[in-house]
Image (cartoon, rainbow, N blue to C red):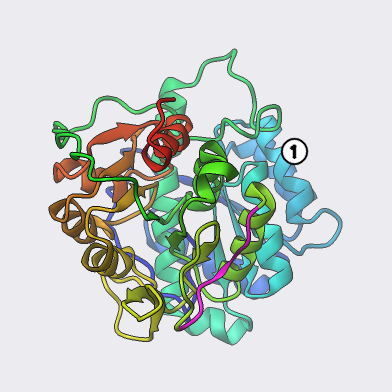
Amino acid sequence: MLSSPAAVSPRMPVSPPSTPVRVLIADDSAVVRGLVARWITEAGFQLVGTASNGRIALEMMSRHDPDVVLLDIDMPELDGTEALPRMLAASPTLQVVMMSTLTTRNADISLRCLALGAVDYIAKPESNRGVTTSDAFRTDLIERVRVFGAARARGRRTASPAAPSHAATPASLAPAPAAKPATPITLRPRARSTGLPRVLLIGSSTGGPRAVGEALAGIGAAALRRVPTLIVQHMPPVFTAVFAEHLAARVGLPAAEGKADERLEPGRIYVAPGGRHMGLAAAAGGPVVKLSDGPPVNFCRPAVDVLFRDAAAIFGAATATVILTGMGSDGTNGARALVEAGGPVLAQDEATSTVWGMPGSVARAGLAEAVLPLSEIGPALRVLLTGQPA
C-alpha cells in the first residue's frame, strides 16, 4: 500500500511491540531526515540513526541492527535501489520501506524494489514544505513502522539460521509464519456451482503488488482470457498506471487503469485508478466501468467494497473473488454482498500475508470458503474459472 495526499488509505491502530522498534532513516534531504526523526521519536520508537546516503546507512546497520529502514530512492554515492539488496543480504528479516515522490519513474522503481525484497513503499510530498505540512504522510509513515516493526519481531522469533536470505530468494519474501490466528476461523460452505464465473475480482493493499502478480501468474494467461479481471489495490495516482504495466508484463495480457464507461472484455485486466473509486454499471452492451470521486469508504479511495458491491449487484453468483494482504477491513462488506449473491470468496492466509488485516477480516467474518497461502491462490482461482480440477 502506498499513500499520498491524493490517495486515501486505511487507518488501523497497531499495538507496539513490548520493546521499542529500532528505526534507521536514509534520505539525502536534511529536512526530511530531521522531521521524520522527530516523528519517530515522538511515536515512541527508537531512532538508531539517520543517513544521507546508502553507504552510510549500511555502515549504521552493522552497528545498530535496525528493525525498520525508511529508505529514499534517490541519494548520492549509493542510492536506495543499490543499497536495498545489500541490506537484505546482511539482514534477511529487515523490514525496508521505500520512500519516493509521485513520479512515473519513482513508481516503476518502487515496484521493482518490492520484487527485490522491500516490504512496502510510501509517497513523499514533492516539496519540503509538503513534507512539513502533510498529516497523511506522517500518519502513514508511523503506521508502517508499527506494522513492520511487529513483523520483524515475529521474524526474529521464528527465523532459522539456515533460512535463505531475501537476496538469494526474492520469491520468499512473505513474513515469518505466525501462530494460530487469535480468532477461530469458520469457513463458509463451498458455493454451489451455477456455471462458470463471468468476472474475477481482486482486492489488496499493503504487500499487494507482489501478491497480485503472483496470484495472476498462478492462474495463468489461458484461464485469465476467459473473464475480465478487476483489481482494487490501495495506491495513489501515477502508481496504479505503472502497477498495471507491471501486471501486463508479468502475465502477458493487456492491463491498464479502468476508464469511465469502458466496457468489460474477457482477457483484460482493469486496475482502479489511484485516488478514484472504481465500480461497475449495467449498460446495453454489457457491464461498464464506473469511476467516482465520492468520499472515501473505509478510509480508502479507491475502495474494494465499492467494486465488490457493484459486482454482486450486476453479476450475482457469477463471480470469483479473492482478498489478498492488506491493512484494515476494506472488502469485508463487499465480500458479504458477493457471498449473499452466491459467489465464492477466497482469502490469503496469515502466514503469507504482509499484513493480515483485509483477508483476516473476511476470514473472521466467516465469508471465505478457503483461506490459502499465496502459492495456492492462483491454482484455486484457475479451478474456479475453468471448472477443471487442478
Relative horizontal placement of residue 365, taking residue 204 as reference (left or right): left
- Badge 1 crowding class, 10 Å Cα cut-off, few under 14, some 14 to 19, many 20 or more, is some
Give yes or no for residue 177 being in the magenta stretch. no
Residue extending furthest toward the right: 77
Height in image: 130 above or below 148? below
Screen quadrant of the C terminus: top left
Q: Which residue is drawn at 19% across and 40% down?
A: 191
Relative horizontal placement of residue 330, taking residue 206 as reference (left or right): left
From the top left corner, tell me how far across and down residue 302 is, in percent.
39, 72
* Most foreground residue, 315 or 279: 315
* Most foreground residue, 26 or 262: 262
From the top left corner, tell me how far across and down residue 38 is, in percent.
49, 66
From the top left corner, tell me how far across and down residue 228 is, in percent.
47, 59
Height in image: 22 above or below 176? below
- What main secondary structure does the magenta stretch of the protein show? loop
Relative horizontal placement of residue 355, taking residue 297 as reference (left or right): right
Q: Which residue is drawn at 58% across and 72% down?
A: 124
Quadrant in the picture for residue 108: bottom right
- Determine whether the residue tagged by mark 1 lies in a helix, strand or loop: helix
State how many labels appear. Answer: 1
From this viewpoint, is residue 227 visible? yes
Mark 1, residue position? 86
From this viewpoint, is residue 71 visible? no
- The three-letter amino acid code for the residue at tag 1 is Arg
Give yes or no for residue 259 being in the magenta stretch. yes
From the top left corner, tell me how far across and down residue 312 is, in percent.
23, 62
Relative horizontal placement of residue 184, taking residue 270 as reference (left or right): left
* Most foreground residue, 346 or 1: 346
Q: Residue at x 36, y 39 (%)?
A: 384
Residue extending furthest toward the top: 162
Q: Which residue is drawn at 46% across and 69% down?
A: 264
Boundaries of the magenta span: 253-260
